Image (spheres, rainbow, N blue to C red):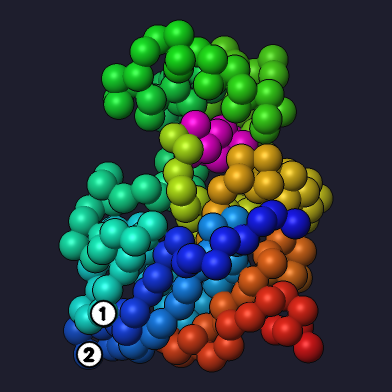
Amino acid sequence: MHQRSNLPLVRLTGISKSFGTTVAVHPLDLTIHAGDFLAILGPSGCGKTTLLNMIAGFLRPDSGTIEIAGTDVTRLGPERRPTNMVFQNYGLFPHMTVRQNIAYGPKIRKKPKAEIERRVAEIIELVHLDGLEERRVNQLSGGEAQRVALSRVLIMHPKVLLLDEPLAALDLQLRKAMQEELRRIHPSIGGTFVFVTHDQEEALALANRIAVMKSGRLVQEGSAEEVYA
């Protein structure tokens, strides 16, 4: 298991969010440590995706603060946070090849060409996309597209990788394979993963910590063993 530091990497204090008269997330506190693989688990409509979107910066909380690596990011947009998100629908560019999709982020950040090529090659090997580099995204299977989406985010070396029901669209066999993949990748990049799921089995298979949400409230948080018991 990955080394966890005692200093929290992400600290949410009293954050809440309402849409009109509907409270999506009641004020909650949550700490995520470096190296954690945290599942936010709960049924549809419990506020877990809203919570993830607040960590990512796509939604601004109505109250409370969000700190990442000791910096208050509550008012910063997603592009100014050390986080990256993998969405359910992958968000890939269909007209680009696998290689172009993966290289997109570093290119936008104007990284040197040689560095981009090296990093793309590393990531392609890490997520087993060898031989598919020149394929268009619309020629890929669901599992391959999922791995490209993951690669596009991993190449940015995010301090915190956010995954919104990332395996929901895959069939059972592929889902199991991708769970293996995520488990393998997690320690090898030394990152911190936070993912949202409504699938208890998936949460237990992947996470070392689980935060259980119900009706917009954080009802339990602890190690996978504690929550399971």
Q: Quadrant of residue 120?
A: top right
x, y percent for residue 74 = 24, 65
In the picture, measured across the screen, residue 194 lies left or right of residue 95, that is right
Task: Please determine whether, in this image, residue 135 is positioned above or below residue 89.
Answer: above
Quarter of the image with the N terminus in it: bottom right
- For residue 21, which numbered disc appears in the image? 2
Q: Earlier in the sequence, mark 2 or mark 1?
A: 2
Is residue 138 visible in the rendered structure shown here?
no
- Taking the image as drawn, is residue 191 in sight? yes
**Is 55 rendered above or below residue 92?**
below
Give the class, few, some or many, for how many residues have Cα within 10 Å of label 2's Cα (few <14, many ≥20): few
Snapshot quadrant of residue 5:
bottom right
Between 2 and 95, which is closer to the camera in this rendering?
2
Q: Is residue 149 magenta?
A: yes
Residue drawn at the location 45% of the way across and 61% of the way down: 9
Q: Main secondary structure of the magenta part?
A: helix
Q: Which residues are magenta?
A: 145-155
Residue under pointer 1: 64
Residue at 38%, 29% (x, y): give it.
105
> Where residue 147 appears, x then y in whole percent?
61, 37
Residue 2 spot, x, y in % from top left: 69, 54
CA gap between label 2 and label 1 equals 19 Å
Residue 77 lies within the magenta run: no
Measuring 73% from the left and 84% from the top, which residue is drawn there?
226
Give the answer, above or below, for where 207 lies relative to 183.
below
Amino acid at pointer 1: Gly
Q: Is residue 9 above or below residue 89?
A: below
Viewer-nearest residue: 211 or 65: 65
What amino acid does circle 2 point to?
A: Thr
| Quadrant into which the C terminus falls | bottom right
